[in-house]
């Protein structure tokens, strides 16, 4: 009987097959741990950034809510005074117990118990910080214009984040820097209010307090978060983009 001989020699793979090249080395445990640490650090940075942005957003919304309450108080005052806006200040001096003890009675106290000390403070400020448009709407020692004379109530800023600015000569409003970041003012001056608009120690202006944006409340009652430059302080009175000008 014939028997076939079985070749038990190993058959070499064809040339160019995957087995020709060197094998890839596996990751070591140390390398895997390093990758896991890097991923964990990156994840913590992302979460921290999100938390920071969320906190800023919450404070910005709270500030806009405060401005809404101040706008309501001003409207109540206005309808009780022949439709005219509250002055920035009037004689005589503020009585004991006032929010602002000054030689004059200033508008937060003139609105008569409709606001508290906390309600004129932006939540990111230690004191004050929400200013009234001066002198276009809030005038000194006399009542402001009647509401009926505001030609663009939907496009005229009444209240905004305000502070004394240290770089008064800076032409770009988005680059204005508060002289004291934790302190604000109860008014912001407009370009028509020279020489005080450009003169220290005055120079109270709108500042970007919320992630390079400012809260602004308009005469019609709506609020916006916007760059300071969109209010148009770089433009003179009567310019279409001068949103501080009620005419």
Image: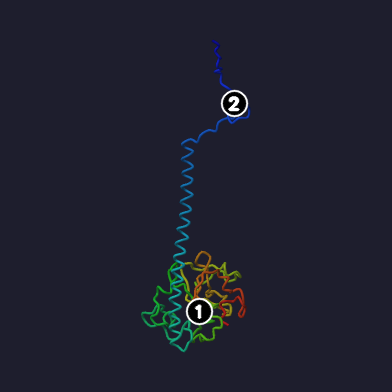
Pick whichever, 150 or 193, lies toward us.
150
Q: Residue at x 61, y 77 (%)?
A: 240
Give SS at disc 1: loop
Please tell me in which quadrant of the rendered image residue 105 appears. bottom left
Q: Residue furthest bottom?
A: 82
Q: Which residue is outermost to the left?
A: 97
Disc 2: CA contacts within 10 A as few (<14), some (14-19) or many (>=20): few
Is disc 2 placed on a helix, strand or loop? loop
Color scheme of the displayed model: rainbow
Q: Is residue 101 above or below residue 55?
A: below
Sequence-wise first label, 1 or 2: 2
Whole-angstrom CA distance, mark 1 to mark 2, is 83 Å
Image quarter of the N terminus: top right
The residue at 59%/76% (across/down) is: 242
Q: In the rendered image, which residue does mark 1 sit on?
A: 220
Extreme top residue here?
Answer: 1
Q: Quadrant of residue 198?
A: bottom right
Q: Which mark is residue 43?
A: none
Identified at 43% across, 76% down, the residue is 69
Of residues 151 and 8, the one nearer the viewer is 8
Relative image position of residue 215 (x, y in whole percent): 50, 71
Q: How many marks?
A: 2
x, y percentage for residue 233?
Answer: 58, 74
Residues at discs 1 and 2 in contact (Cβ within 8 Å) = no
Determine crowd level at label 1: few under 14, some 14-19, many 20+ residues with C-alpha closer than 10 A. some
Q: What residue would you read off at disc 2?
A: 13
Residue at 51% in and 34% down: 26
Of the pair 10 and 49, the residue shown nearer to us: 10
Quadrant of the snapshot with the C terminus: bottom right
> Residue 195 location in percent, x, y?
58, 79
Using the rendered view, name the quadrant where residue 192 is placed.
bottom right
Q: Nearer the viewer, residue 103 or 225?
A: 225
């Amino acid at each position: 009987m014939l028997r076939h001989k079985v070749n038990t020699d190993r058959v070499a793979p064809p040339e160019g097959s995957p087995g020709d090249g060197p094998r890839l080395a596996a990751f070591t445990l140390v390398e895997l741990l390093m990758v896991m640490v890097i991923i964990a650090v990156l994840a913590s940075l992302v979460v921290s950034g999100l938390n920071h942005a969320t906190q800023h957003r919450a404070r910005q919304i709270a500030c806009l809510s405060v401005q809404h309450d101040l706008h309501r108080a001003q409207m109540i005052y206005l309808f009780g005074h022949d439709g005219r806006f509250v002055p920035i200040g009037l004689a005589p001096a503020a009585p004991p117990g006032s929010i602002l003890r000054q030689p004059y009675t200033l508008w937060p106290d003139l609105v008569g118990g409709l606001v508290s000390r906390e309600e004129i403070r932006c939540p990111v400020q230690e004191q004050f910080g929400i200013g009234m448009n001066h002198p276009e709407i809030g005038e000194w020692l006399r009542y402001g214009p009647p509401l009926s004379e505001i030609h663009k109530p939907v496009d005229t800023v009444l209240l905004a984040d305000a502070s004394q600015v240290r770089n008064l000569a800076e032409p770009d409003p988005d680059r204005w820097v508060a002289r004291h970041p934790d302190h604000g003012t109860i008014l912001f001056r407009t370009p028509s209010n020279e020489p005080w608009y450009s003169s220290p120690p005055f120079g109270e202006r709108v500042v970007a307090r919320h992630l390079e944006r400012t809260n602004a409340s308009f005469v019609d009652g709506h609020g916006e978060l916007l760059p300071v430059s969109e209010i148009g302080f770089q433009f003179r009175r009567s310019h279409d983009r001068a949103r501080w000008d009620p005419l």
